[in-house]
Image (cartoon, grey):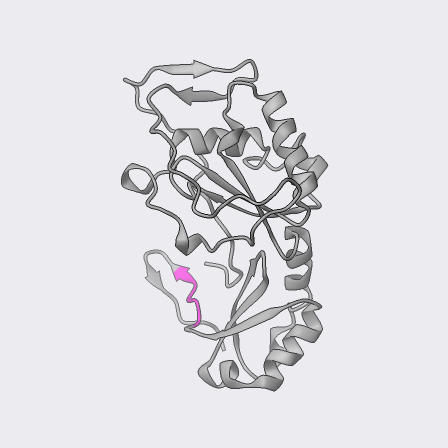
Amino acid sequence: MSRWSTDRLALGCATAGALVLLTTGCGTAIVADDPLPEPRTEAPGKPGTAPPCPSPGLSSARGTAGANTPGANALVAALGLREREGAPYTTYADIFSKVIVDHPRGRVALCVTDPVRGEAWVAAAGKAHPGVDTTRVDLYRGRYARHETQAARERLRDWASYPFPIHVVAVDDAGLRVTTSPAGARSKEFREQLTKDAGLAVRVEAGEPVLPLTGDRPRPPRG
């Protein structure tokens, strides 16, 4: 397992054989008995505005056995976020911050740095996929775009140069989250140095190192 944190979403559109499928002109499958979406968690902002990006931990319970609902999966595909290539994603990749599937159930939280262009993104997805209900996409404002946080993470690659161990560097809409030793988490100087090197906000937390796996057993880190 890599020490670099990756954000993984269950975006597959698995469907049960007994369910009736509807297909849009673009080939996006929607399950006919997809559960009705829950109301959005936060009140929507005025046009061109958006509330702050929520934490995934605040999401409602997802579909059966932890799977994402088919309707939410269809929205992710329509936005171009499954493959992250081609329109409409490539047109708006510079404002993309984070996506939370089934926040709450049946809805998608799309965090962007520019809500006005975010509205255009959702409209473009709806035009390209008329069979997908894009009113289930809720816009939020992210502090940083994903390409900014990924570049910042690359600037912290020289872990050995720091006085405290770095276990994980994770990206989020609000910046980077660095996991280190308890002493490192208490060090103001360490946090300031990481923030300076990254060029954006860094949150430092105490945590355990991630052990690489050998077969089905953890392997102690080298050195």
Residue 2 x/y as whole percent: 50, 60
Magenta range: 209-213
Residue 165 visible, this angle: yes
In the visual, does 180 lie left or right of 199?
A: left
Above-or-below relation of 127 to 84: above
Magenta stretch, main secondary structure class: loop
Nearest the eye: 34 or 13: 34
In the visual, does 53 lie left or right of 95?
A: left
What residue is shown at x 43% (from left), y 73% (from top)? 207
In the visual, does 158 lie left or right of 27?
A: right
Residue 64 x/y as whole percent: 28, 37
Nearest the eye: 119 or 173: 119
What residue is shown at x 40% (from left), y 60% (from top)? 213
What residue is shown at x 42% (from left), y 40% (from top)? 102
**127 in the magenta segment:** no
* Quarter location, residue 210: bottom left
Nearest the eye: 55 or 157: 55
Residue 46 x/y as whole percent: 61, 43
Looking at the figure, which quarter contains the N terminus? bottom left
Residue 23 x/y as whole percent: 47, 15
Residue 13 visible, this angle: no
